[in-house]
Image: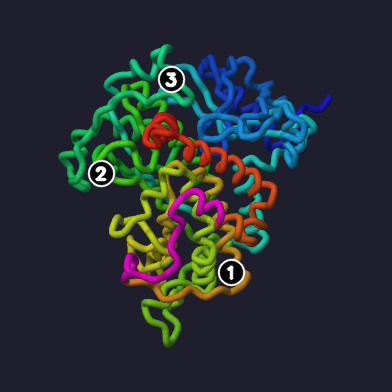
Amino acid sequence: MSSFAERCGIHDARREQALQQTARLIGATGLELVRFAWCDLHGVTRGKTLVASAAERAMREGVGLVSTLMLKDSSDRTAYNVFEPGGTAGLPGFEFASNLLLLADPDSFRQLPWTAGTGWVRGQPWFQNGEPVELDTRRVLQRALGRLAQAGLAMRCGLEIEFHIYRIEDTRDQLDPLQAAWPGAPPAVSMIHPGYNLLTEAWYDMAEEPLRIVQHTAQALGLPLLSLEIELGPSQVEAVFDVTDALTAADNMVLFRNGVKQALRRAGYHASFMCRPPFPNIMSSGWHLHQSLVDAKSGENVFRCDAPPAGTTPADARHTLSETGAQFLAGLLEHARAMAVFCTPTVNGFGRFRPNALAPQSVLWGRDNRGAMLRVIGECGDAATRVENRIGEPTANPYLYLGSQIHAGLDGIQRRLTAPAATDAPYASSAAKLPASLGEALEALRADTVLTAGFGQPFVDYFTRIKRFELNRFEQAEDKDDFQRREYFSRF
């Protein structure tokens, strides 16, 4: 009798070999537990922990998950009335909190460095009839990458991730059963460095203990960490990762963000990827995405321009970028307002878009300009020529962030769009402004037919409903600061 993985059409000789190799590793290393994890809409890993002896069978037959896991907002409230007639209209397979099956990729196996005797595998959800769950955000990116592949292209990405690390001083409020709430309070914390001394060695030395944990965790997980840095804000740090293919970059972001939170927590630290933690005098954290397209066969960077075309100036996109690169840049600008909600998906993140803050405010590009939304990096002939998108916040779901870049950029290539001149005054421009709120960003997505078609109307309907559910609760909250402390700082 065929296994569930075979009925789903994903199990072949190569997967069988990988599965057997993973099963041998689990046995040889004496693991007791294996976590089967999946990335939800909000970029958080969820799943089940199995005893090691059950792992091989689970990679063939799947692990059951309640389908409402895919219908939850950022507080874990279900945004659909699954037990009412018509409550899941448009979402067949999600009625009555029915079951999904999580199938893990045996190639994703890792031994977790912060907990003894525990392995980890990444999975994706399937319906019980063997059909893929298309709302899964990793599949959303896979479909976008499929569009790129049809054009003979692939994407390469490098990650710069700013976040905050705090020392946990007291967990009594967080863990007191008499004060339990939905969501619960964060721990009481203190800073690991006082800030406002960018890249100072002294502050790095002060913060070295938690940063060593970040380093060891990332490297033990096989992530391509390049550097750890002291950022400007109090208790703010940055991690920089080497370039990889886009899907690997997104997988790495999920693994890094969720892994370091757990490793640091065990050592008495609270890592927060919330854009603007709930304290005075903080600095916003961004997630800067470096991206380029390469020829799918040769791997050559198709953004690279060998020489400036005659008649161009440094203010022209074609002066630095190839024709394809300039068109991709124009597509990102064309759909910037609509893509913003995938890059900055929380109420909190839109407070970052302010003048003179090393964060963008308008839909502009510039040559090596950190105030512009898009920063073009590289000179003619530079194999590392790329576009840096600076509108992301570190809580963004990486599969949706990267997917939005592909759909927007491809539209620029297909319609042969032309970018305006580069800005030299990113905060004094009359150019269109980025959305100033989550509600405005959701409306911009709804109005963009190209991005809606790229992601698919069913996914856009699903995504906007869940984000509206979150937004409505924020708007109804009497204490909006407390909402953000519990909703974002405690959990993200």
Q: Callout 2, which amino acid?
A: Gly
Label 3 sits on what residue type? Thr
Mark 3 or 1: in front is 1
The reply to whether the magenta stretch includes residue 444 is no
Q: Residue furthest bottom?
A: 311
User: Is residue 102 left or right of 471 when viewed as pictured?
Assistant: right
Q: Crowding at label 1, few (<14), some or many (≥20) Cα neighbours within 10 Å?
A: some
Question: What element does badge 1 sit on?
Answer: helix
With respect to residue 453, does 10 lie above or below?
A: above
Residue 186 is situated, as x and y percent measured from the top left of the image, at 37, 26
N-terminal of the pair, mark 2 or mark 1, is 2
Q: Earlier in the sequence, mark 3 or mark 1?
A: 3
Q: What's drawn in magenta, residue-wise?
A: 425-443
Give the quarter of the image for residue 230.
top left
Q: Outermost residue toward the left?
A: 202
Percent x, y for residue 277?
34, 38
User: Is the C-beta separation of discs 2 and 3 under 8 Å?
Assistant: no
In the image, taking residue 137 as reference, residue 189 lies left or right, namely left
Q: Say which element carries label 3.
A: loop
* Few, some or many residues within 10 Å of mark 2 (<14, 14–19, 20+): many
Residue in view at x 37 percent, y 24 percent: 265
Question: Is there CB contact under 8 Å for labels 2 and 1?
Answer: no
Dot 2 corresponds to which residue? 233
Q: Tag on residue 115?
A: 3
| Residue 290 badge | none
Q: Give residue 300's position: percent from left, percent from top.
A: 52, 63
Residue receiving disc 1: 413
- Position of the N terminus by quadrant: top right
Q: Nearer the viewer, mark 2 or mark 1?
A: 2
